[in-house]
Image: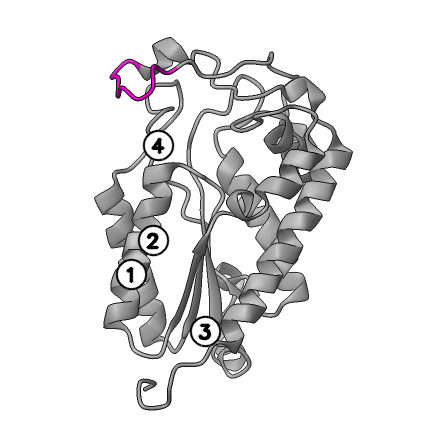
Amino acid sequence: MILETMTMAAFKKHLKKTKTIIFPFGTVEEHGSHLPLNTDTLIIFELLKRVVKKKKVFLAPAISYGVCTTTSQHPGTIGITPPTLRRLTRDIVTDAYRKGLRNFFLITGHGGGLHSAALKEAAEELVESLRGITMGVFCPYDLLYKELAELAETSNDSHAGEIETSLVLALAPQLVQGRAKEDYPRLPRPFVVKDKARYWRSGVWGNPAKATMEKGEKAAVFMVNKIIEIIVQGEKMRLPRSLAR
């Protein structure tokens, strides 16, 4: 059930059937010279549209801005700070709670460390302040690291590499502009440097030339099934009656 296209009458009707809503999170972020800036948002929202066809829950509009650090200086990347993401997350979940929703899944297509941490921190605050809720926060790539690594021919595949390019080929092939060359970041860990683009000009982490539509479809199936599995698990969770409102 796509929230943004529903009427308030339809919302009230479906609220009697489910108290579950998914909030997708993405970015406006460089993804090499071959993928669009909305790659993270595109992939997660298209996958979640498949999820809600199989599992009748609410799907909120995607939050298209996220916390971008390593890619912050690349052309096209427009990010927000962790406090902004935490505040936005708290506000939308709190208001959705006021409207009767109780099971919240914050699912991000962007795996940045500070980005994911901000979502988890917001969730920790929300479970303390809102009674009777279930909170799930995750990035599908993290949960399916083994399966996706086995699917990829490239070892250490990541940002704008083989799997992400394959997913865009499967979900929106018209947006793939050729293939960028294989590359990897050369950041001087553990140091934090200001001029990050100097160490990673291409913005590619992996080998996009290995990407195929078939791999993308297999990855999409893995991810959709895992998301549904987690939603079902979350909906079965129950607080003690004394704690539920």
Front position among marks 1 and 3 = 1
Predominant SS along the magenta part: loop
Does the magenta segment cover residue 192? Answer: yes
Q: Give the CA separation, mark 1 to mark 3.
A: 30 Å
Amino acid type, mark 1: Glu
Label 4 to label 2: alpha-carbon separation = 16 Å
Q: Sequence-wise, which precedes: disc 3 or disc 2?
A: 3
Residue 57 visible in the shown view: no
> Which SS class for mark 1?
helix
Screen quadrant of the N terminus: bottom right
Measured as percent of width and height from the top left, residue 3 is found at 49, 63
Please tell me whether mark 4 sits on a helix, a strand or a loop: loop
Q: CA distance from mark 4 to mark 1?
A: 22 Å
Residue assigned mark 1: 124
Which residues, given as a range, are shown in magenta?
187-195
Which one is earlier in the sequence, the residue at label 3 or at label 4? 3
Residue at which label 3 appears: 8
Instruction: Give residue 237's position: percent from left, percent from top.
Output: 48, 76
Q: Secondary structure at mark 2?
A: helix
| Amino acid type, residue under disc 4 in the picture | Cys
Q: Are marks 2 and 1 in contact (CB under 8 Å)?
A: yes
* Residue that lies at the very extreme toward the bottom in this rendered image: 242
- Mark 3 crowd level (few <14, some 14–19, many ≥20, 10 Å Cα): few
Nearer-the-camera pick, 127 or 79: 127
Q: Nearer the viewer, mark 4 or mark 2?
A: 2
- Residue 132 is one of the magenta-drawn residues: no
State the separation of the CA atoms marked 3 and 4.
35 Å
Q: From the image, tell me which residue sits under label 4.
A: 68
Q: Which residue is mark 2?
A: 120
Residue at 28%, 65% (x, y): give it: 126
